[in-house]
Image (cartoon, rainbow, N blue to C red):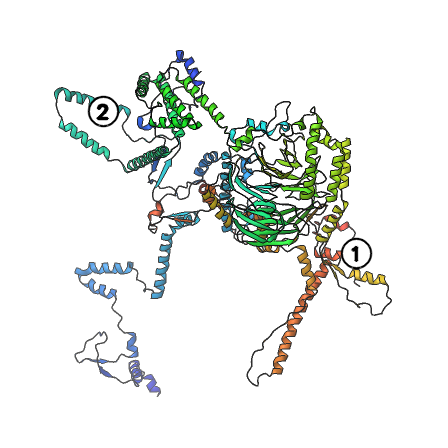
Amino acid sequence: MSKVPPKGRAKPKAPHKRYFDTESAAADGDTAGLQPVKLKRKNQQNFVGDFIKMQKQSKVRKPLRPTKVKAEASDPAEAQKSHVPPELLAKYSRGEKVEARGVKTRHFKEQQERREVYLDYATEQAARTELLLQETAGQLGADDGEITAEYRQEQIAENVDLQSAAKHFSLQMEFGPYTMRYSKNGRHLLLGGRRGHVAAFDWVTKKLHCEFNVMESVADVQWLHVPTMYAVAQKSWVYFYDKKGTELHCVKRLTNVNRLDFLPYHFLLAAGNSSGYASWLDVSIGELVGNFNTGLGDIRILRHNPSNGVLCVGGSRGVVSMWSPKVREPLAKLLCHSTAMTAMTVDPKGQHLVTAGLDRTVKVWDIRMLNDQPLALFRLRLPANELDVSQRGMLALSQGTYLETYTDLLSGGGTGDRSKLPYLRQRCDAFVHGLRFCPYEDVLGVSTAKGFHSLLVPGCGEPNYDALEDNPYETSKQRREHEVHALLEKIPPELITLDPNEITGVDAPTLQEKVDAKRQLFHLKPPAIRMNSRRKMKGRGGSAKASRNKQIVKDIKRKEFIAEVREAKKGVIRQHSSKEAGDDAKPRPKPPRSVLDRFKPKPQKKHKT
Amino acid sequence: MSDDEEHYNPKAHKKLLTAIGSLGSVQHIQKSTRDERQTRQDEFQLVKSVRAAASEHKPRAVGLNDLVQILRTSSKHAQTGKKLKNIQSTKKVLEKPLEKPAADRIRRTIGYEGVTKKLGRWDAVVAQQRSAETQIFPIPSETIYVNTAAHAKPLKTSIQSDLAKELEASKQKLHELRKAQIGDTSDEKVLAQQERDLLQKKLTRDELFARRKELAYLKMRESQKSAKARMQNKIKSKKFHKLQKRQKMLEQMKEFELLQKTNPEAALEKLNAMEKIRVQERASLRHKNTGTWAKNLQVRAKYDKDVRKDLAEQLAVSRQLTQKQKESDSETELNIKPAAHEEEEKDYDPFNPWTKQKTKQRVEIDEPLNHDDEPQQQVDAAILESAPEAKVDSAVDTIDLANVATLVWTQKKRSSGALNDALVNDDEAEYDEEDAAAEHQLTISQAFEDDDIIADFNRDKTKDSELKNTELQLAMPGWGSWAGAGISHEVMERRNKRLLLKLAAPEKRRDDNKDNLFINETSTKQARQHMVSSVPFPFRSLADYEASIRAPIGRNFVPETAFRMLTRPAVITRKGQVIEPMDESELVKPDRRLRHIVDKRIKRLPKVPPKAQKA
């Protein structure tokens, strides 16, 4: 039934026309008849623009200071307009405000408050952009009596759209076990066969950039900051090639490299070699910023932590050690397994470390808090030999030729029920040598001994990409611009620390430094005093007198110094000699005196000896 | 002599006295000079010098009283004298003028006050300008607000009411009727009309502005539209144009339907127009396969699938156009459906390797893994197939140290069929500890277990983590041992212990009570160089300082709008415009209306009260 609006009131906004509206109108056409449509004037019909209003300078003089009432009146309207749900604001919040108490002068207080208004606005705007994140990550949902683990790739490919189905493919190649990398935006794929085969292609359009055989063994491949260049760790050295396969560089300082990794924000190519050397090559200036022996032996497992750029090296002793290019000892070591490790990965957000060992467990660790107990533990039939975590926190692991994915890193399981069943599983034709989720795609790339498989894993990739960060559809112009920006924002290698926010802190001396300073007090020597006595007229002061004066001055200075040091030493001794002294140094606050205290037994006076 | 005393004559005595008194003084007679007032004028101009006694009777200066006395004498001037007397008694005497420096000082003070007052009027303006987040120069004089709200009322440009318009129109009609009937050309009325028109043209300034803006806007829209049309025309894709054309047709149909309900006459016209198009099409050969293009295509059609499809589509169009229209809706749907189907089909290309992959199933994957009722031999075979390869690869590639362990593992794997079973029905068996399979698992893991790993790790950890050189021995060698050898060891020990200084209590570390973790707490020296050495000035604590730099302002971290605001310049100047100094009119102008929400919020911020004066 269509209601006729009362005449006095304004017409309610017409809803969008629906397919059933015409029928209903036709149905009661007999009774109500056709509604006449009011046609607008011809020049108004197409006018959808803005209406412009001019405000002339008002003759009435306003008070220079706006009245408070007016400000309050404008308040609710504005609040209504800028309404953003608080949970969204909390999501995008950058942390606690600076309290006005913590800022010193009135001027700076006001300045800081104004600053906070700007930051609030930035948070609000960021929260508003949530509206643009239209894509949602779906997942396979199983019907009753089915589980997602029994779905095969073919079934999935049949049921998805053509474009997605085209992302499922496999390549048969004969140059031995393959390693693989996706570029940072997930658009390009790099394959390296042990027997020298290197191929780079745009895997979405299946357009081959280059393919060649280096006629040497290939240990690992790695894209650099742009998908036009990549590094290949060959038999003895690391080579750089461009998209067309032209050799750009041969870095002979990186020898016998087993594993490569790239830190995109630092422009560092990290390499671990077979004699235990970890090396960082700054690809923007072509300089080795760090190259030292880790003492871990052959480095076979190497990943960087995307959140802080620390290089995690999995050792044969079950220990994951974390390295920074400018520190020659590990920043942290974590004993993950009591057996040798077989695989390791860090999730793209840099929150979790996932390790697998020969003890047939896969453990998930909190890499930020660095607890010594794992957050989650997967027990497997066979040790996992490859691991990877997707952007949405899915875990993929391979055991020989067999591979499984789990929807959640911490709770495991598939979507159908949250039991321990894997989400999807797959048996490959050959031993799995590389396993990477493709960024921003629901695709898992698997490189095996006999080729490459691209598997569909619905819901694994991040559906909303930030085109300023990684743009899968970037043009060459955008790529160039991005490269320049990235270079300008390059982070210096010495800032690679466990806590990336350390730089914001204040440099306070460590305990060891304090101890050393105190120790030094006891071994201090008075500084040499150089004194040039004033030149006097002839007969006024002979050399004997001058040297005597000099000696006097020196003695005074030395005595002063010694007195000072003695005082300082006394202070140190007082501070550390005994518990009582320690107590004296830091007097306890006295309890408030009460009237009844006078009845307490008096403390005995110490006898002077 | 007594007689003399009796003969005292006072007159004579006095005379005598005066004579004696004047003994010393000599009468000087000088020629008078005309330098002073004289009471008596002498023809010889000889004047006695004024004596001391006479000086007391010195004639006073002529006062107003004397004048009045004189005036009083004549009755003619008596009134004037009175007046003068009055004036003198009432009037105050002018003070002596101030010294020049003092006068100047006063003048300066007054001037300063005046200027302060004058400049004080600018205080508000200056304060406002100083506290403003941004200043725009030259100062914008007029503001134009664009109301972009959808529900905003359209601008009313005409002043006449609808009724007035109608009246006028009827009048016009009447006039024209008269004109037609009697042929009178009333010039005066035409003239009046013209005049009125001219008057009407004189819009007010605002209206003129508004009109101009509106026109500009319309023009912009027009140009946008035409640009879009041009762009679309340039598109070479035939498919696109085809689709566009189809869409237009559909739109026309919809419009027609709408018209049918609302405006039957217009609908009829529209129908006629459509019919006309159909007829024209029928008469022409446009969409037949007789054109040059179609003929050329026909040659290739035998070999090319796409070409065949194009031709078919062409014919379909002509068929559709030439057919008499009956049920337009169902027809279009029918046309669309097969096309979609065709698209699906044509995706298959025998020469495309990627589609081949999709269609042909190559690898037989883990189908049996999920079905327990499947024969197990198949699975075993599959696993055994992969097993040797697995062994080789794992031994060579992924495991470096534990070669021995790997061998053990592979042996076990081969020998025990239980493992394979476990892999098959892992759903049930996976977490069952009591199982035989689980037992096997345990033994295997025990075989791999290497206690040394943990012990080694802990040893390394303690070695690395302990503080170095924390103790200081204050006892000197030889000190207190003057008695020579033979002093009990214990005493020495006790003394040494007493004199041992522990410089630091055992450190509280992040990895305390965490057995499997070691954190190196000596961070990089290079990183420390980048840090501040103490909390910077306006902040009181480290937390405040850190909070002040918590939020990034770069383009990559905040939305563009926020970035613009965060990096807004303090002063904005327009290029090529002269910035005039402010004049008095600035004082009376209302506050600039703040448009941005940030500005509004900042304005609403409470002012920090000035610090209370210390009493």
Instruction: Pick whichever, B108 or B268, lies toward us.
Output: B268
Tally of numbered discs: 2
Q: Position of residue A406 (x, y in %)?
A: 64, 33
Instruction: Pick whichever, A41 or A338, lies toward us.
Output: A338
Q: Is residue A412 above or below residue B108?
A: above
Residue at which label 2 appears: B168
Q: Is residue B434 visible?
A: no
Q: Position of residue A5 (x, y in %)?
A: 41, 19
| Viewport quadrant of the N terminus of chain B | bottom left
Q: Position of residue B506 (x, y in %)?
A: 72, 53
Q: Position of residue B51 (x, y in %)?
A: 28, 79
Q: Is residue B50 visible?
A: yes
- Mark 2 burial class by Cα count in 10 Å: few <14, some 14-19, many 20+: few
Three-letter amino acid code of the residue under disc 2:
Glu
Q: Quadrant of residue A95?
A: top right
Q: Residue at x 25, y 64 (%)?
A: B65
Task: Establish whether labels 2 and 1 are both on one chain.
Answer: no
Q: Residue at x 86, y 63 (%)?
A: B488
Numbered label attached to residue A604: 1
Is A25 displayed left or right of B218 in the figure?
A: right
Three-letter amino acid code of the residue under disc 1:
Gln
| Viewport quadrant of the C terminus of chain B | bottom right
Is A302 displayed left or right of A1 in the figure?
A: right
- Subunit under mark 2: B
Q: Residue furthest top?
A: A30
Q: Quadrant of residue B492?
A: bottom right
C-alpha separation, residue under disc 2 versus residue under disc 1: 118 Å
Q: Is residue B219 above or below residue A217?
A: above
- SS at badge 2: helix
- SS at badge 1: loop
